[in-house]
Image (tube, rainbow, N blue to C red):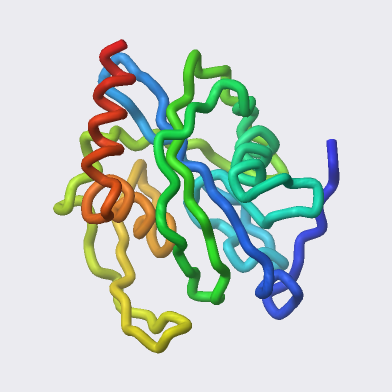
Amino acid sequence: PRRRRILSRGSAMSSRRFAVLLPILAHDDGPRILLMKRPERETDPYSGQVCLPGGALEVDDASLLDCALREADEELGIPAHSVEIISELQWQETGFKHEVKPFVGWIHNPPDIRPNPAEVEHVLYLPVSMVAPELFQERGTWTDAGGEKRELLTFRLDGYEVWGLTARILENGLNSGPEAGSIRRRIDTFSKS
């Protein structure tokens, strides 16, 4: 496997673009979103957070989508050929001013999830049915690169806090964003087939 350098908070990481996959899997009780808790590391600005699989665009990635799919495979063992992209969401920005492009993907014939222990401490499953406006609480505010004050969202899942960028992507992608209705319809179609 390819080794990646973990960059510290003030390094070149701040000028790079990132991509994440919002992976949705079929389950007997309805579709679920796959999330992961990152291990605690001093060199990782997102240490210990619950997040979506993803990472920085690398030289070998043909596109941001390629980056998101590569990371999902490296972190969780989800092969790219099993992912059907439902939607590309609008750009998001982190508190560290990182630009992140989210993609929503349906996982066909879900593989056995094989978390990479160097990148994943725990795997969590969020029922899509729970992702409703009442799930999210305000944790505070932050100021984006354009100087606009934004709500910082949070919710609890299996004893863990899901907040910040991950909560915002989930809320935007499945509730308030321009693609939310279309994404919900596609999930319903996939889960019935």
Q: Residue furthest bottom?
A: 147
Query: Quadrant of residue 16 in the image?
Result: bottom right
Q: Position of residue 87 (x, y in %)?
A: 41, 41
Query: Quadrant of residue 65 in the image?
Result: top right
Residue drawn where x is 80% and y is 47% of the image = 60
Q: Residue furthest top?
A: 193
Asked if residue 182 lies left or right of residue 148, the reply is: left
Whether 94 is drawn above or below 134: the answer is below
Asked if residue 51 lies left or right of residue 26, the reply is: right
Location of the N terminus by quadrant is: top right
Q: Position of residue 20 (x, y in %)?
A: 54, 49
Residue drawn where x is 70% and y is 80% of the image = 10
Asked if residue 125 lies left or right of residue 174, the reply is: right
Q: Residue furthest right?
A: 2
Q: Residue furthest left?
A: 134
Whether 119 is drawn above or below 129: the answer is below
Location of the C terminus by quadrant is: top left
Count up the numbered dots: 0
